[in-house]
Amino acid sequence: MRPYGQYCPMAHALDVIGDRWTLLIIRDLMTGTKHFNDLERGLPGISRALLSRRLRQLQQAGLVEKYSGATTTEYHLTQAGKDLKKVITALIEWGAMWSFDEPRPDELNPTLLLWWMHNRINVDKLPQNRVTIEFNFYGAVSGVYWLVLTRKGASVCLKPPGFEIDVIVQADIAAFYQLWLGRISYTEALNEFGIRVDGLPKLVRTFPDWFAWSVTAPAVQAARSKPTTPYSPSGKRTASIWIGER
Amino acid sequence: MRPYGQYCPMAHALDVIGDRWTLLIIRDLMTGTKHFNDLERGLPGISRALLSRRLRQLQQAGLVEKYSGATTTEYHLTQAGKDLKKVITALIEWGAMWSFDEPRPDELNPTLLLWWMHNRINVDKLPQNRVTIEFNFYGAVSGVYWLVLTRKGASVCLKPPGFEIDVIVQADIAAFYQLWLGRISYTEALNEFGIRVDGLPKLVRTFPDWFAWSVTAPAVQAARSKPTTPYSPSGKRTASIWIGER
DNA sequence: CAGTATCCTCGAGGATACTG
DNA sequence: CAGTATCCTCGAGGATACTG
């Protein structure tokens, strides 16, 4: 994107972070993603070539540092990158308030949802032993997926992981998405949206604590309780035309 | 810009306001610009066709309302648009902190600077009678411009306005830009950057109060007093390469 | 003053194949 | 695992001319 060429702090900020994907990459780095392939997985639709280019631009701009080890490569935010927290928070709050309705079917991506979940595990709330969760999604998109959680790490499986299933979750994919993002509460999910969590009672009881849920959930919950009618992106509105004197 | 297709408040926010120019347009509307031609003047480089398109998109997204009167047309932010204030403030603060060095010569646009100034007049601090200010800019860009201020309004002139000159300002254009944006203080401007303001003592004394200065000045001043070394966009830095164990 | 219509360019980024 | 190289497409937006 060509710079605006304006000597103005906001125009300069947008020259650095205004490119497509850039802020989403920074948000992922801010929430702990470090590896190239993990960034790619969290940003469906970006090409590897473009991700690579954006990371290079962010390094040149001084927002990201690349650490190349013998076996792995890590990307970290610099202080300048971390300082974008306020911008990102403000964007999330605005989006939660004014541009966050029910999901459209094409926005429902079970693999991405599971990928998000595996990044937000409350390790100290997990049972001592490994738990294997099977997700049966139905609705706009359906499919079966697995999450294997241990205190050492979490992994997403697209095929049966071969372990005994400890917990089975059956959920409308749209409802589970909204639960993850804080648009509906866990209680509402069970009672009004038909989400079922089955397994040993002790596991079922602690299940919701295993996850830290989405970083955006607090903002989405806050927006929900505000009085203003949120803007609905589905209902196109025509321009208000006002004629006469003020 | 194609939507990201992610059910996530931040991605949705960027789908609405992530297009080039969009946030700059909203910032101008937020600081009081209402008319199409005034928006165009404040956004050098945008084409009228593109400005027209962006305003239409913003109306459809519910951030802007268009009021067509008999003789004039006005664009106003809706509540959704006004709620972007936190995003814009955060961007200005980040830009002031991390991406705001000395101006590049091609960023110095005297007409734009005068246009900004004429939008930020402290009407109640003006003398009773009309004042005409002549600006003699030199340095990277030079030229003579006039500002005519009355309690009824302000206007920028590119030719002598025909009134007697009350105040003459002589300034390096880069220095005056930095003064306007809060990067140097008025005292520094006079004592260290050679800016001269001449005229009747009473006028010269009150001159700095006639203007509200840039909206970004407080953020720029705050960034100046922070300890962190701001990122310098002029000095390209190579990626930090780190080898070995963590 | 406040735009629209039409044509055209060029560069962002996708697709594909390849590499240490 | 972490990318790069090459080719190609298509759409954002500029240029120009026009309008109520």
Image (cartoon, coloured by chain):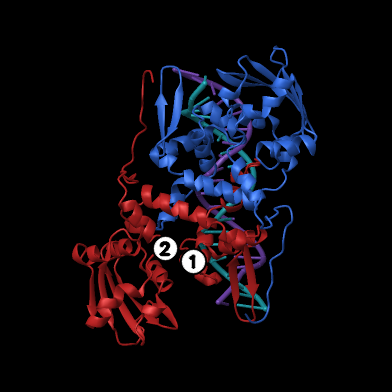
Chain colours: A red, B blue, C cyan, D purple
> What residue is shown at x 51% (from left), y 53% (from top)?
A87
Helix, strand or loop under label 1: loop
- Amino acid type of the residue that numbered disc 1 sits on in the rendered structure: Thr
Q: Quadrant of residue B207?
A: top right
Q: Is residue B190 toward the left or the right of residue B21 in the image?
A: right
Could you confirm whether marks 2 and 1 are on the same chain? yes
Label 1: how many residues lie within 10 Å, few (<14), some (14-19) or many (20+)? few
Q: Say which residue label 1 marks.
A: A31
Q: Say which residue label 2 marks.
A: A215
Q: Quadrant of residue A70?
A: bottom right
On what subunit does the disc labeled 2 rest?
A
Residue C14 versus residue A153 in the image, above or below? above
Quadrant where the image shows the C terminus of chain A: top left
Residue A156: percent from left, percent from top: 40, 76
Residue B53: percent from left, percent from top: 48, 36
Question: Are dots 2 and 1 in contact, CB under 8 Å?
Answer: yes
Instruction: Compute the Cα span from label 2 to label 1.
Output: 8 Å
Q: Is residue B22 toward the left or the right of residue B69 in the image?
A: right
Residue A193: percent from left, percent from top: 22, 63
> What residue is shown at x 62% (from left), y 14% (from top)?
B129
Residue A150 versus residue B231 in the image, above or below? below
Q: Quadrant of residue B242?
A: bottom right
